[in-house]
Image (tube, rainbow, N blue to C red):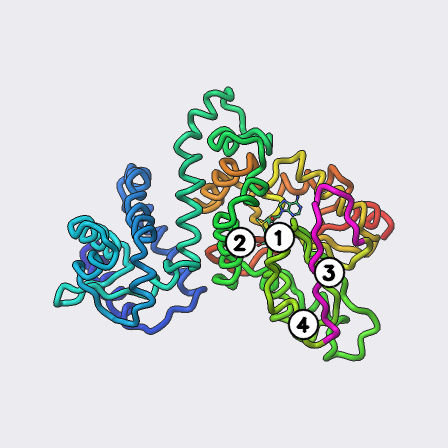
């Protein structure tokens, strides 16, 4: 194989792609996968780990820029170009430091440098401005994740290298010197809570393939509740347990606007009070969304609903608490109820586990003493509380997020059929 010709052809392809206006998400994912495969073969074996050891500096630059209000200024000024000195004088930062920060942000693709040496903000700047998805994520990572990661080796050494499994005495509590769970701790820190909720919402909104309605065949399965088919004689009862501010319900209603039903959004009081405003006034009146403060370690008050939905909840909890959450749902389920679990499901084959799966698994270990589970681990967990895993729905092509939907029913209802 002529490797020089191959390199030239890759560069030409990149050049051609850069003038293509948009690349569809699915195509983007496939291209990225192909590039990753190629670099895994040609990169020096040490290179991946080595890069990870220095990868922090672009995020440090972004965090400092957030603190200085650079993105806020640039995004809201209405101007298209800025000199480094202009940004320095607006933010009060030392001109040399601002210059170094802007250079780093440019190398990360956040700014472009014009021929005249001024900086023009790229599309990422809006996500880095206050309230933006990337700003929230960076704040959360700096203030919490990185603090824990810095001490995780020490924590694991002090705990005889056991995999953390105590939700109330794990790496998070060790570093933040508390015995509160991360979710409880956030209640008295509104900016952290806000960053967390925004990150959760953005994760599913940005990537179609992460939407549960793209994975589970909602139209086919909820056909009888759609007002377009024939007059419905029954309305869907769906309970979203630990549903955050309601984005998963909203995605369902956006996907199936003629769905008739009653949707109960359950979460802790501090979260439920921020339920998305568009869910508070639902049109048509045949759709109602009720916000219900509820602790999922208590008996489930809504019994015999058609669907119980748990989106990205179980990965927050080690087995003891996950079992308790599931047990309460199991006790409320009727024989025809279905439990849908929208979560990352790791392949049982370790060779197929993706780097992003392992990153998220370590995040869960650090924050919640919990884990990302394989299909076999989910099956066992569900079986331990009398639930049967009937199917794992996976996206046709995995996107940036590697979510699946697990469908479970009461084990005794399977035996009856
Ligand atoms: C990772 S978020 C998932 C939110 C949403 N389901 C989604 O997929 O984006 C987990 C949610 O569980 C909620 N939660 C934590 N402890 C809870 C409890 N004891 N009872 C009810 N909800 C709780 C949190 O407030 C948070 O909204």
- Closer mark to the observer between disc 3 and disc 2: 2
Lower sequence index among marks 2 and 1: 2
Asked if the residue at label 1 sits under 8 Å from ligand 1, the reply is yes
**Which quadrant, please, contains the N terminus?**
bottom left
Residue drawn at x 46%, y 21% as measured from the top left: 157
Which residue in the structure is indicated by mark 4?
282
Mark 1 and mark 3 residues within 8 Å of each other at the beta carbon: no
Q: Nearer the viewer, mark 1 or mark 4?
A: 4
Magenta residues, start to end: 285-302
Q: Residues within 10 Å of mark 3 (few under 14, many from 20)?
A: many
Q: Position of residue 110 (x, y in %)?
A: 29, 59
What secondary structure predominates along the stretch shown in magenta? loop
On whether residue 348 falls in the magenta region, the answer is: no
Residue 161 percent location from the top left of the image: 49, 23
- The alpha-carbon separation of the residues under discs 3 and 2 comes to 21 Å
Determine contact: label 1, label 4, CB under 8 Å.
no
Disc 2 secondary structure class:
helix
x then y, percent, for residue 240: 68, 56
Of pointers 1 and 3, the one earlier in the residue sequence: 3
What whole-number distance in Å separates the C-alpha atoms at marks 2 and 4? 22 Å
Q: Which mark is residue 197?
A: 2
Q: Which residue is mark 1?
A: 311
Residue 332 vs residue 361, the one in the foreground: 332
């Amino acid at each position: 194989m002529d490797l020089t010709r191959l390199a030239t052809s890759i560069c030409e392809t990149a050049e051609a792609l850069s003038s293509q206006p948009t690349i569809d998400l699915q195509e983007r994912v496939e291209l990225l996968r192909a590039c990753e495969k190629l670099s895994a073969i040609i990169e020096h074996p040490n290179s991946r780990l080595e890069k990870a050891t220095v990868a922090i500096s672009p995020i440090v630059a972004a965090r400092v820029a957030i603190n200085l209000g650079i993105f806020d200024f640039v995004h809201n000024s209405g101007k298209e170009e800025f000199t480094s000195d202009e940004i320095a004088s607006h933010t009060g930062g030392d001109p040399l430091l601002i210059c170094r920060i802007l250079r780093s942000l440019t190398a990360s693709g956040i700014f472009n440098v014009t021929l005249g040496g001024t900086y023009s903000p790229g599309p990422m700047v809006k996500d880095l401005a206050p309230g933006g998805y990337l700003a929230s994520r960076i704040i959360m990572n700096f203030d919490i994740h990185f603090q824990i990661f810095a001490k995780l080796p020490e924590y694991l050494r002090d705990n005889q290298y056991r995999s953390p499994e105590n939700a109330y005495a794990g790496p998070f509590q060790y570093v933040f010197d508390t015995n509160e769970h991360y979710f409880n701790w956030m209640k008295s820190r509104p900016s952290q809570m806000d960053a967390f909720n925004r990150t959760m919402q953005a994760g599913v909104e940005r990537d179609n393939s992460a939407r549960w309605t793209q994975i589970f065949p909602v139209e086919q399965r909820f056909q009888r509740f759609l007002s377009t088919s024939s007059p419905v004689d029954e309305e869907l009862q769906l309970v979203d347990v630990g549903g955050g501010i309601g984005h998963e319900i909203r995605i369902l209603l956006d996907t199936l606007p003629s769905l008739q039903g009653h949707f109960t959004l359950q979460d802790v009081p501090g979260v439920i009070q921020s339920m998305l405003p568009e869910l508070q006034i639902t049109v048509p009146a045949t759709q109602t969304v009720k916000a219900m403060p509820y602790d999922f370690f208590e008996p489930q008050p809504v019994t015999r609903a058609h669907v119980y939905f748990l989106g990205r909840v179980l990965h927050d909890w080690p087995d003891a608490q996950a079992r308790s959450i599931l047990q309460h749902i199991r006790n409320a389920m009727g024989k025809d109820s279905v439990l849908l679990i929208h979560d990352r499901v790791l392949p049982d084959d370790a060779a197929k586990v993706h780097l992003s799966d392992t990153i998220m698994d370590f995040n869960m270990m650090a924050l919640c003493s919990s884990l990302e589970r394989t299909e076999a681990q989910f099956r066992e967990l569900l079986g331990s509380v009398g639930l049967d895993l009937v199917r794992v729905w996976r996206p046709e092509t995995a996107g940036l997020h590697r979510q699946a939907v697990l469908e479970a029913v009461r084990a005794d209802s399977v035996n009856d059929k």
